[in-house]
Image (tube, rainbow, N blue to C red):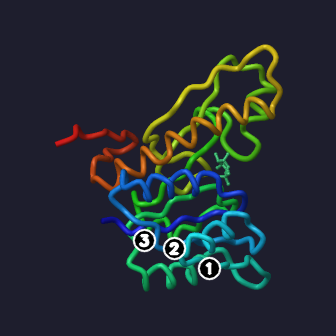
Amino acid sequence: MKRIAVFLSGRGSNFRAIHKEVERGTIGGSIVAVVSDNPDAKGLQYAEEKGIEHRVFERSGGKTRAEYFQSIMEYLETLSIDLIVLAGFMIVLSENIIRRYQNRIINIHPALLPSFPGVEAQRRAYEYGVKYSGCTVHFIDEGVDTGPVIDQRVVPVHDDDDAHSLAERILEQEHILFPEVVRLFCDDRLVVNGRKVFIRQEK
Ligand code: GRF
């Protein structure tokens, strides 16, 4: 069983989707901690309701990003974390935590990378006029949304969409894709070779 930490800053719908699968027993892991930079994140309430250990690390003045993540890492060490899941965590990770958890941090991005990295990806894809967008789960590297792609789901853009309806359609797919990738990770089925990630066949 893998020990999972979920990092989030807001709503936490991806966290809930993953947790549901953990509860259903389809994922060979358990969520042992939730970390947030935002004390008002809705995802924290859900953690509280479900009795999942959670902690707020506020990004208050004085600390560098490396120091901020150092204190988070000290917390994670006490919990022997195998996998960090970034589920709407809005702070760019520092080098020390990326190095410490190399190929063990995954993120979901609401666009088909490498298109539309960064914030408000759904709106920017909509305004660009693409016919298809989607979501991407990838490993974290030093760049913003540049790490090796694990898997993607494609979502069509309809003529009567607006940025909001497109984001909703993408989110539905996020809630399918992200738990699926967490399951593959927990079953040791992800093989990273440079920028390529291969999914090993089920034994
Ligand atoms: C999602 O759109 C995800 O793709 C992005 O942040 C959002 C988080 O939503 N990284 P939620 O907090 O999981 O509901």
Sequence-first disc among 2 and 1: 2
Residue picked out by circle 3? 100
Percent from the top left, x then y, of residue 164? 80, 34
Residue 20 in the figure: left or right of residue 130: left
Is disc 1 placed on a helix, strand or loop? strand
Percent from the top left, x then y, of residue 154? 56, 26
Sequence-first disc among 3 and 1: 1
* Residue type beneath disc 1: Arg
The dot on residue 39 is none
Residue 138 visible within the image: yes
Q: Residues within 10 Å of mark 3 (few under 14, many from 20)?
A: few
Percent from the top left, x then y, of residue 172? 62, 37
- Residue 159 figure quarter: top right
CA–CA distance between discs 2 and 3?
18 Å
Residue 118 in the figure: left or right of residue 174: right
Sequence-first disc among 2 and 3: 2
Are the residues flagged by discs 2 and 3 in contact, CB closer than 8 Å? no
Residue picked out by circle 1? 55
The residue under the point 74% across, 71% down is 38
Is disc 3 placed on a helix, strand or loop? helix
The residue under the point 64% across, 66% down is 46
